[in-house]
Image: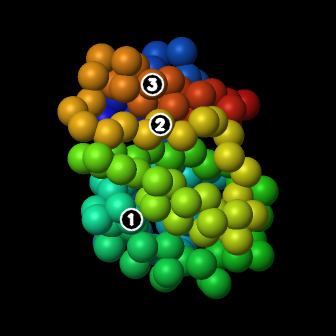
Amino acid sequence: MLEAVVSGATAPEIENVEVVRRAALSATATDVLNADAYLLGTPANLGYISGALKHFLDQIYYPCLDDTQGRPFGYYVHGGSDVTGAVRAIDSITTGLAWRRAAQPVTVTGEPGKSDIEACWELGATLAAGLMD
């Protein structure tokens, strides 16, 4: 799913957009402040976002609260059977940050199929296209 998102965001028709990938545990508030948009991805672990994504969001929340309001974001979640809690958590936290959802989230339960991978590609492409000069 990650590779499909990145492929969409870096498609040949996307121009003047730099895509920077950061693992949740290595991303910092400075990374968030320097970015024009955000694309989050997480497994649904025990019905919730991964501990790594939760840690990242906890670390950047207050340092980025005022300066990133209104920035576009998107996300995808993959779980074995239920992603409801993970979706609710991301929606709640990003609402608190006042980020603007620029694309519908991609949520997948079970093994990702072809349409799920295509939806991830579209997610990446949509978010990146919205940033083109």
Q: Label 3 belongs to which residue? A: 119
Residue at figure coordinates x 38%, y 65% from the top left:
48
Viewer-nearest of labels 2 and 1? Answer: 1
Tell me if label 2 and label 1 are in contact, CB under 8 Å: no
- In the drawing, what numbered circle is on residue 48? 1
What residue type is disc 2 on?
A: Val
Residue at figure coordinates x 63%, y 83% from the top left:
63
Residue 91 falls in which quadrant of the image?
Answer: bottom right
Residue at figure coordinates x 46%, y 54% from the top left:
84
Q: Is residue 86 above or below residue 131?
A: below
**Image coordinates for residue 70, horizontal then vertical, percent:** 78, 56
**Image coordinates for residue 1, horizontal then vertical, percent:** 31, 36
Residue at figure coordinates x 70%, y 58% from the top left:
99
Viewer-nearest of labels 1 and 3? Answer: 1
- In the drawing, what numbered circle is on residue 126? none
Is residue 100 toward the left or the right of residue 7 in the image?
right
**Element type at mark 1:** strand
Residue 90 falls in which quadrant of the image?
Answer: bottom right
What residue type is disc 1 on?
A: Tyr
Mark 3 surroundings within 10 Å by alpha-carbon count, few (fewer than 14), some (14 through 19), many (20 or more) = many
Mark 2 surroundings within 10 Å by alpha-carbon count, few (fewer than 14), some (14 through 19), many (20 or more) = some
Measure the C-alpha gap from mark 2 to mark 1: 15 Å
